[in-house]
Amino acid sequence: MHTITTPETFKAHVQTLQKSPNYREPLGFGICRVDVGQLDRTKVLQATYPMVNWKENFGSAAVFLDTLQQSGASVETQGSEFIAPVTEAFLEHALAAFSPYIDEAHGEAHKNVQLILGIKEILNEQGFWPTQYRVVFLFEDSAPQSVEAVYLKLYALSLAKAPLRSLNLTGAFGKLHNVAWSGNTPIELAWLRANEIDLKLRNEFPVIDFVDKFPRFLQHIIPADNTRILEASKVRFGAQIHAGTTIMPGASYVNFNAGTTGTSMVEGRISSSAIVGDGTDVGGGASILGVLSGTDGNPITIGKNSLLGANCVCGIPLGDGCIIDAGIAVLEGTKFSVTVAERAKINEVNSVKLDKEVYKGKEIAGFNGIHFRQNSLTGEMSIGRSKREIKLNAELH
Amino acid sequence: MHTITTPETFKAHVQTLQKSPNYREPLGFGICRVDVGQLDRTKVLQATYPMVNWKENFGSAAVFLDTLQQSGASVETQGSEFIAPVTEAFLEHALAAFSPYIDEAHGEAHKNVQLILGIKEILNEQGFWPTQYRVVFLFEDSAPQSVEAVYLKLYALSLAKAPLRSLNLTGAFGKLHNVAWSGNTPIELAWLRANEIDLKLRNEFPVIDFVDKFPRFLQHIIPADNTRILEASKVRFGAQIHAGTTIMPGASYVNFNAGTTGTSMVEGRISSSAIVGDGTDVGGGASILGVLSGTDGNPITIGKNSLLGANCVCGIPLGDGCIIDAGIAVLEGTKFSVTVAERAKINEVNSVKLDKEVYKGKEIAGFNGIHFRQNSLTGEMSIGRSKREIKLNAELH
Amino acid sequence: MHTITTPETFKAHVQTLQKSPNYREPLGFGICRVDVGQLDRTKVLQATYPMVNWKENFGSAAVFLDTLQQSGASVETQGSEFIAPVTEAFLEHALAAFSPYIDEAHGEAHKNVQLILGIKEILNEQGFWPTQYRVVFLFEDSAPQSVEAVYLKLYALSLAKAPLRSLNLTGAFGKLHNVAWSGNTPIELAWLRANEIDLKLRNEFPVIDFVDKFPRFLQHIIPADNTRILEASKVRFGAQIHAGTTIMPGASYVNFNAGTTGTSMVEGRISSSAIVGDGTDVGGGASILGVLSGTDGNPITIGKNSLLGANCVCGIPLGDGCIIDAGIAVLEGTKFSVTVAERAKINEVNSVKLDKEVYKGKEIAGFNGIHFRQNSLTGEMSIGRSKREIKLNAELH
């Protein structure tokens, strides 16, 4: 075991490690606690990361890879991901390497060291289950090969360490197991079935909150102080909820790989892969269609300072400062008339200029400052310039 | 006590019992554990069945009726239902009768025997409350007379042992008590009131998840491995959720005696008595009206492979391969125009033929292949032939 | 200590107290248990009142103010509110004063005395935390200055002791802390952050039900026996839910300072400050706009026996016996045509008479007997006389 005694020798040690052929800079890494199946102990049902490193803390990465090797793990860095169990030997080697930082590892400082110390303490208290904690490395953003890797990517999205829609989640659904969730505990459905008679007779049948492959956002993520999520079921893990966003409990839902990138009041649905910009409000029951339903796979982005009225449907991307009136559906094929006067006002805030009298929804996808409405005496759908201010982009002038 | 020693003598014994005047073939039967009132111990608040027999396992029925009689219960099979407490004597007699099957009663085999063994084990461990477990027989499908009978019928629906809308639930609401549910435990509101001061001062006021007469589906039913219910509150007990269905948490709800009969993505409301066919998706916020609200008591059936767009309202039955566009309301009185060309295409996939230019919703209830839409420039509602494929029924050709 | 021995001396004692310059008649008062921050023990996260006095029980108020003074608290009645910790001395003095009622303080009788006895018992059993219980007085309906005062007002609204929209809640949002709620326990987000590593490693991360400044209605209020709230997240504390109301779990939500004043079936949203009258049903996904979204700060009142169809939007006040058809949006600026014949029928049930051919929503706000609909062949929105009966007010004739 190689005990490092000063920050200087630690830094030198890391530099050496990072030059070694065994080192590869990871995209993300972390140590997780896994929940395994009640019947099938080899099945990982959930991976909980107390700390996620994403394009950062490469010194800790180098130390972890090295100490895994030293502790006997056969480290493989050429694949897209690598997982190893946390062993007692790994803990000892890691503590030796992190030795100069142990005393100051609390609060916001040296969280990877805190993690090692925390597991060590649990080991001392409770004894040890070698497969309960795992070191997980992601070297490339290819299709995830393990439950641990899927969770690491969902964490990166939900912690806003990776932008929405930026990660390869191909096959993620297939990797996750569909389970019954009782609080934070995933339970195999087959285990419930095998024990149904006994559990029900003894009044010990667990309270099942939901059945899904994904946990909920609030099971893994602590939101910002000014974020409100009025009902945990309304945000799936893998969603991104920006500080200052409020998610109301009526008809709202935010799916994974979807969410807000600024302050928003959300009372409607932000479906899979949909992104809502800063200052944009999603009215009660409003529905932004997702790639899994209704948009032919084109993900919807909505700009800043827009407003989706109650019970409207938004099936196209919107720019900044748009309004969809309550109760109307704006789809790719919906036709909207526009007057010459309104067209001129719309053109002032867009680089692509309108010159026709009728537009289909998909033709004005992403335009700024559009107000979508329906004439209540004729039923005609039309667009005009919304009264919402738009910060003009340089490219327009 | 009459101990049966071989499967052959068991079968002969059952045949004899089934010929006796005391035997009557039940519609359904089972043994349940009941939760009673905290204040009124005679009030049954919930009946939990670990195993439901529905038009099946008549041998076990005969044994149960006989052993009840032997153990001193005054068995009455002429009424529509019969309930008796599980007593120690009943358990002994039943075990004697089931003796040849005891060794093999595990896993999927002999669940009624497992149930008897399970209660016996609890009795041995904990002592015995004679009224906690009850044997329940339903001989006819008339209006349920007890909480236990209502639950047995709701189980039959939720386990898909009885088709939706096939059972007499007259007066079921009146039989059930409105209670506060804390996890799986029903609590009398009057008990909460009587203990409010003490519970609140001691910080022991229970977490109340909901107040209703019905429990939730997931409190009693273990769904199929490929079924997802992303929030337990969204499905009432008594609903039927077919394998492969997903219930999203946004604006969805499935009431009792309603549900899916195939694979469906459900993001909207399936109101009481509404049935959704295989492959039909219910978009975000879509509302299928129920017999208790909006349909004049005519329950709505929707065929296969149809699509209800986001925030649409469906107030009429639909056939196969229909589409309702997002945001529009299709009610009995809504008028729809149809062109000659579209009429011809619709007629190809329906046995009743269209020949007018305008139809009210109720006139085209149950038709196949209809696409309901609204012209965005004129506000006119129209129908045409949807692009969805329909498996033609033999009767059409 | 001044022990009162008979009801007569108690009454005389109270009369004396109420004439003293130290007495001031409170608007409301009560004793609450407070939950304080895990990190900041001076921060009140929640105040739970087992019993709320609102414009009532002034005798107990006089006794509480006097015994606080006697027990050494520096009582201040000139401000809008006053809070003092419950001390052992206060309990002793109060018990001495309430002495003639102690034996009969159970069930519905003498709840303030029960409260004192209850705290005394807990003190005897568990020892004492002087700041856990607090006596709270509200003397004026001005902007609340404390968490305890905000809660007392929300209780008054939710218990229907004060009418909706009748209380000054200015700044209430600012007084409450945004916290994570696990069951009935509020948890500081900063505490979760500070302990995230340890909680997650030990599988002790709490189940977070929601993150909000307000708790839920059912955490504090026991509804009437015929009230159903099918999902606790659907009603915020501070809402008023009248006996006989049903809140369904689909797309519904009732915000604080909003609710029902009679029997209603609610399957949609009753936004902040909206009030729904007796017999009025809010259909699945229907949205009543609130002062915080969409109504320019004008709160919406809906009269009796009205019907909001599924997925409609209501942005104006309605009178009695109105109908909004499913799926349509009735906003302040929406134009509605009306025929001469329908106008005459509408005028029969309203004191203000219609005489134009087209009305904007805001011009017919609060009218009785209006049926709002959209012509399905032309898209024209119109109003007519609904078929719903209206109890005519005297003023009309």
Image: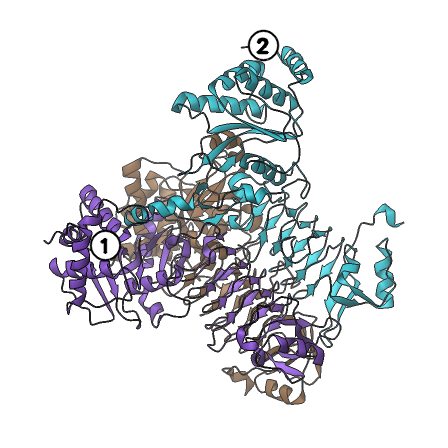
Chain colours: A purple, B brown, C cyan
Q: Residue at x 59, y 65 (%)?
A: A308
The location of residue A216, given as percent across then percent down, is 41, 57
Residue with the mark numbered 2: C5
Tell me the kind of residue under disc 2: Thr
Chain of the residue under the numbered disc 1 shown in the image:
A
> Mark 2 — on which chain does it sit?
C
Amino acid residing under circle 1: Tyr
Mark identifier at residue C135:
none
Asked whether the residues under marks 1 and 2 belong to the same chain, the reply is no
The CA span between labels 1 and 2 is: 67 Å
Of the 4 image quadrants, the one containing the N terminus of chain B is top left
Foreground of the two, A344 or A35: A344
Query: Measured along the vertical axis of the image, is residue C37 above or below residue B169?
Result: above
In the image, residue A4 above or below residue C128: below
Q: Position of residue C21 (x, y in %)?
A: 67, 17
Taking the image as drawn, is residue A72 in sight? no
Which of the two discs, 1 and 2, sits closer to the camera?
1
Residue picked out by circle 1: A133
Residue C149 visible to an observer of this rendering: yes
